[in-house]
Image: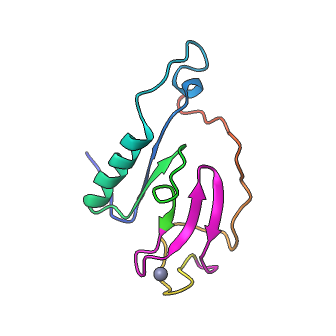
Amino acid sequence: MPRYLTADESVTNIRLGPSFANGGGDARPLAASAASLSRARDIGCANGLRYVYTGNVHDRTGGSTWCRGCGRLLIGRDWFELTRWYLVEEGCCMDCGTPLPGVFEARPGNWGARRQPVLLRQ
Ligand SMILES: [Zn+2]
């Protein structure tokens, strides 16, 4: 049975590096450009999704989280770097109190710019 996204679920369009595409073997460039990721984000937003992101590219607008209540930048991201954290402990906007869907720590983590391999299938 197909399941459709709700407006509050997040979607991230990421650009996979060659090492992910072919297990590091005969790596070849992928077709997904930053522009195509941004276009995919625009399409998602135009169709009612509130939290659509670009990933693995420098896109401060498309990689960040914005308040749906007042438009304020809530979680700023630039690739893997957090550039802003504007949430109260309960995960709401500091200005207008609109809750951001999700589970949040009281303070931002310290992930930083590093890679972590992810096993997608066993
Ligand atoms: Zn707000």
The magenta span reads 66-90
In the rendered view, does 53 fall on the left or right side of 83? left
- Return the residue nearer the eye: 61 or 68: 61
Q: Nearer the viewer, residue 122 or 34?
A: 34
Q: Is residue 71 above or below residue 16?
A: below
Please identify the residue farthest to the bottom as the structure is shown. 96
Q: Is residue 16 magenta?
A: no
Is residue 4 visible to us here? no
Residue 72 on the magenta segment: yes
Image point 48% across, 87% down: which residue?
Answer: 96
Q: How is the image coloured?
A: rainbow
Q: Position of residue 46 (x, y in %)?
A: 26, 59
Please give left or right for residue 86 compared with residue 102 in the image: right
Q: Quadrant of residue 62?
A: bottom left
**Dividing the picture into quarters, in which one does residue 106 lie?**
bottom right
x, y percent for residue 35: 39, 43
Residue at horizontal 61 percent and vertical 36 percent from the top:
118
Residue at x 61% of width, y 19% of height: 24
Horizontal side, residue 107 vs residue 26: left or right: right
